[in-house]
């Protein structure tokens, strides 16, 4: 299972590293996920949430 934000669904994206000699290798950019205790449907759970959701107040911390 890929790591994703459980609030907004943000996932990693795929791209390429390109060196000065134009050697191309695959790489991934992962979202900045934090495991926090949050109130989900009235109970406390540990969930993976991206930092943008934490900062914008979309998550109510326990």
Image (cartoon, rainbow, N blue to C red):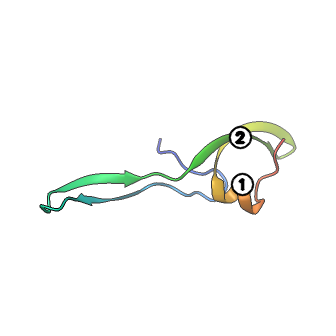
How many C-alpha atoms fall within 10 Å of the one at disc 2: few (<14), some, or many (≥20)?
Answer: some
Q: Is residue 36 above or below residue 31?
A: above
Q: Is residue 59 left or right of residue 17?
A: right
Circle 1 sits in a helix, a strand or a loop, which is it? Answer: helix
How many C-alpha atoms fall within 10 Å of the one at disc 1: few (<14), some, or many (≥20)?
Answer: some
Looking at the image, tell me whether mark 2 or mark 1 is earlier in sequence order.
2
Query: Which mark, residue 62?
Result: none
Residue drawn 47% across and 41% down?
Answer: 1
Query: Which mark, residue 54?
Result: 1
Residue drawn 60% across and 51% down?
Answer: 5
Residue drawn 84% across and 39% down?
Answer: 43
Q: Position of residue 42 (x, y in %)?
A: 87, 44
Q: Is residue 49 above or below residue 55?
A: above
Quarter in which the C terminus is drawn: top right
Circle 2 sits in a helix, a strand or a loop, which is it? Answer: strand
Q: Is residue 58 left or right of residue 32?
A: right
Query: Which mark, residue 36?
Result: 2
């Amino acid at each position: 299972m890929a790591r994703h934000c459980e609030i907004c669904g943000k996932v990693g994206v795929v791209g390429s590293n390109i060196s000065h000699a134009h050697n191309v290798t695959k790489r991934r950019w992962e979202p900045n996920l934090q495991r926090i205790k949050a109130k989900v449907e009235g109970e406390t759970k540990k969930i993976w949430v991206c930092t943008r959701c934490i900062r914008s107040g979309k998550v109510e911390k326990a």
